[in-house]
Image (cartoon, rainbow, N blue to C red):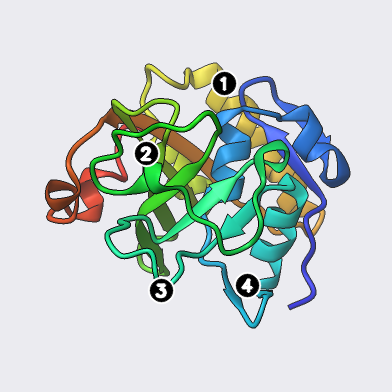
Amino acid sequence: NGLQLDCVLDGSTITEVPAEEVSATLEDSELLKCLACCHSLTYVNNELIGDPLEVSIFEATKYKLVDPNEDDVGTVAECTIIPPSKSTTHGEVNTSLYEDGDELMDMQEYGILRRFEFQSALQMMSVVVRDITKPSSLFVYCKGSPEKILSLCTEETMSDAHRADIQEKLTYYTQNGFRVLGCAYRQSDFVKFHQLNKMNRRQFETNL
């Protein structure tokens, strides 16, 4: 309780981004989408509820979270995440996130299709996301202990030198009393929802 986002380290460039500059500096990046999508937040009585640090991180992205309405029969998205410039009134859900997803609208939205909650034994959580501008793909965004996330990154996506640079930053932050979370993602081919629902989390949380 009481933890607030201080900064985000862009692992691709080893650049530190202050919390108040996260949305503008990381605009349209996969890192920003991960921060906006990978959480367990929800609305209760129009109030964003969840882990205080997750709330702080999400608010820094300036994205909006939209829970499905009771009338949204057929939607497969647990919730919809909308970038700041594309935000709609709370409560609206785009029909492009329905199972067939054939009617893509001229806006950007990310539908959370599956969520794997944080487990202490696994030291991470993840979400499976559909970007309606890329209908042939799914994105898996993961968040957890930096050590765990680093262990799931492949040699193709992260060299030993790059890994060492990140580890050096991690040591600096932890020695100065910061709580540090790691983020990573991967892109995969789109599968129908009934197939997606049968897959286990190990099939998603790998080869980041």
Distance in Å between CA atoms under marks 1 and 3:
46 Å
The disc label shown at residue 162, or none? 1
Circles 1 and 3, Cβ within 8 Å, touching? The answer is no
Question: What is the number of the mark on residue 152?
Answer: 2
Cα separation, mark 4 vs mark 1, equals 31 Å
**Marked residue nearer the N-terminal end (4 or 1):** 4
Residue that carries the numbered disc 4 in the rendered image:
51
Residue 70 bears which disc, if any?
Answer: 3
Cα distance between the residues tagged 1 and 2:
14 Å
Q: Residue 139 placed where, x, y %? A: 38, 36
- Within 10 Å of disc 2 (Cα), the crowding (few <14, some 14-19, many 20+) is some
Distance from Cα at disc 3 to Cα at disc 4: 25 Å
Q: Residue at x 33, y 29 (%)?
A: 135
Q: Identify the image quadrant of the N terminus.
A: bottom right
The amino acid on which the numbered mark 4 sits, given as a three-letter code, is: Asp
Q: Residue furthest bottom?
A: 45
